[in-house]
Image: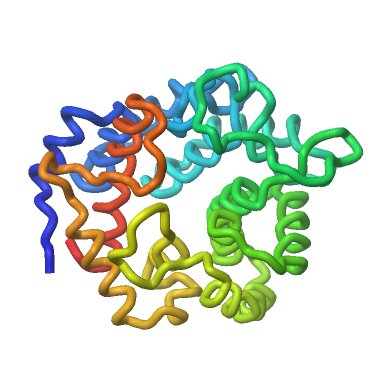
Amino acid sequence: MATPDIDKAVQFLAANARVIDRRRYERLFAGGRAQPVRDALAAYRNPDGGIGQALEPDGRTPTSEPIAAETALRIMDETDVWDPELVNGILGWLAATAPAEGGVLFVHDEMANWPHAPWLVPDAGPRGTDGAPPASDIQTGLMAGTLHKRGVQHPWLDGATTVMWSRIDGLTEPTPYGMAGMLHFLQHVPDRDRAEITVERLRPMILDGGIVTLDPDAPGEVHSPLNFAPLPGSMTRPFFGEATIKAHLDHLAAGQLEDGGWTFNWLAWSPAAEREWRGVLTVDALRLLRANGRL
């Protein structure tokens, strides 16, 4: 059973990671204060209250984007730096830019004007009455889940919740990223009875829908059970069994490279994005391993 070398990981982060990810590590593992994390996040905030400036490494636009806003909310939650000023700015931006149906788009048109990963394009599908693409299952679910976890009440969240229940109830062809957004939503939405019934209904789609790879050594851009059940308390953790989860945690622990960092299994489309993602994922790997009793 591999044991990560924490000292090498720290050296990797010092040599390669962004300020925000070094602050994440300090906060999570070294007794760091909340304010430096908040200040690092504030550097990505725009005058419209949204978040941009490539906080999510694949979207290199300075303009506000859903993927950056979701990243900011997640960082504030995981580090317990839930800053009302930043959160309210994000909520105001979400409300001002929501499609007519509610929720949030996957990306905005401005993304096309800046360097970005080839998959960061508007969702296909029927456009709404406002001419906007459909709301994103991924971004709407992830943000709504985090906001529910924090007990937020806001009109945008009410609309996003309606969108997510509708999408989940009508789901027939799951996708890996869309399912991740749905499960994060279901993990934290206040209607627990409905969430538990719904997760059981989704079980065959998760296990038999071709979206999860049970072999931890499978090559390519595959999705581990840890993508859908990252924590011991995840609603879908019982779907996979202890042996399978242990095998994937072993694989994650052994994934530390010689330079001390972790890497990813999708297309490295940009040297800058690759380096930044490795910093993000190194902190993520350590956080996930610790949460599962492996550090």
Q: Position of residue 263 (x, y in %)?
A: 28, 44
Whether 5 is drawn above or below 112: the answer is below
Where is residue 6 shown, x and y percent of the image?
Answer: 12, 48
Quadrant of the image containing the C terminus = bottom left
Asked if residue 134 lies left or right of residue 184, the reply is right
Residue at 31%, 58% (x, y): give it. 288
Tell me if 220 is positioned left or right of 191 in this view.
left
Residue 270 position, x and y percent, is: 38, 27
> On the picture, is 4 further left or further right than 70?
left
Outermost residue on the front side: it is 219
Front residue of this view, candidates 89 and 231: 231
Residue 225 falls in which quadrant of the image?
bottom left
**Colour convention:** rainbow
* Residue 47 pos. (x, y %): 60, 17
**Foreground: 199 or 161?**
199
The residue at the far right in this view is 129
Q: In this view, does 203 lie above or below 125?
A: below
